[in-house]
Amino acid sequence: MHKSFKKSIKLLTFVLKKFEMKTILANEKLSTIISLVEKKGVDNPKLIEELKSLRVMALTEKDPLVVKVLRLTYEFLTENAAFNVQAQYEEDEEGNEYPIEIEEKENLLYLLNLLKNAEHKVNREELKDYRTSLKTELY
């Protein structure tokens, strides 16, 4: 094998591992935040700082939807000291949508779990619903 080709392979492997490391770190941070919410609920003072830290990680991963949802989430929590965002709906046989009543802790946990697999098509649609609801309630 040619030397420059070997160097290219090593560089590519390093870059991929570096990217993987960011994803692993972000997923670990997300898991930590989920545990925090499960144990202490939405009114934990560390929660907002943890979400801000996760947002910085999301910026490096270049996913504008996740970055926006995280920012709106901690802004909403800061402003309201609660997470009573109405972003989940169910549909009846005629196509009418009705909001799903959900406890604020479970609501935030649901959103955080959507972020675990933010690339999934259905999750992205639900994240967009949260983004829209958060924007509407904040602004």
Image (spheres, rainbow, N blue to C red):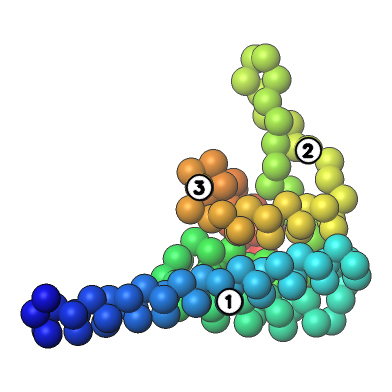
The quadrant of the rendering that contains the N terminus is bottom left
Q: Residue type at mark 2: give it.
A: Ile
The quadrant of the rendering that contains the C terminus is bottom right
Choose between 111 and 131: the one closer to the eye: 111
Residue drawn 27% across and 81% down?
10
Q: Residue furthest right?
A: 40
Choose between 32 and 109: the one closer to the eye: 32
Q: What is the x, y in percent for residue 77?
A: 76, 70
Choose between 91 and 2: the one closer to the eye: 2
Residue drawn 36% across and 73% down?
16
Q: Residue type at mark 3: give it.
A: His
Circle 3: is it few (<14), some (14-19), or many (20+) Cα within 10 Å? few
Q: Residue 57, located in which quarter of the rendered image? A: bottom right
Choose between 79 and 66: the one closer to the eye: 66
Q: Residue furthest left?
A: 2
Q: Which mark is residue 100?
A: 2
- Label 2 vs label 3: CA separation? 22 Å
Q: Is residue 57 above or below residue 42?
A: below
Q: Is residue 21 left or right of residue 7?
A: right
Residue drawn 48% across and 43% down?
121
Badge 1 element:
helix
Q: What is the x, y in percent for residue 133?
A: 64, 53
The residue indicated by pointer 1 is 25
Q: Which mark is residue 120?
A: 3
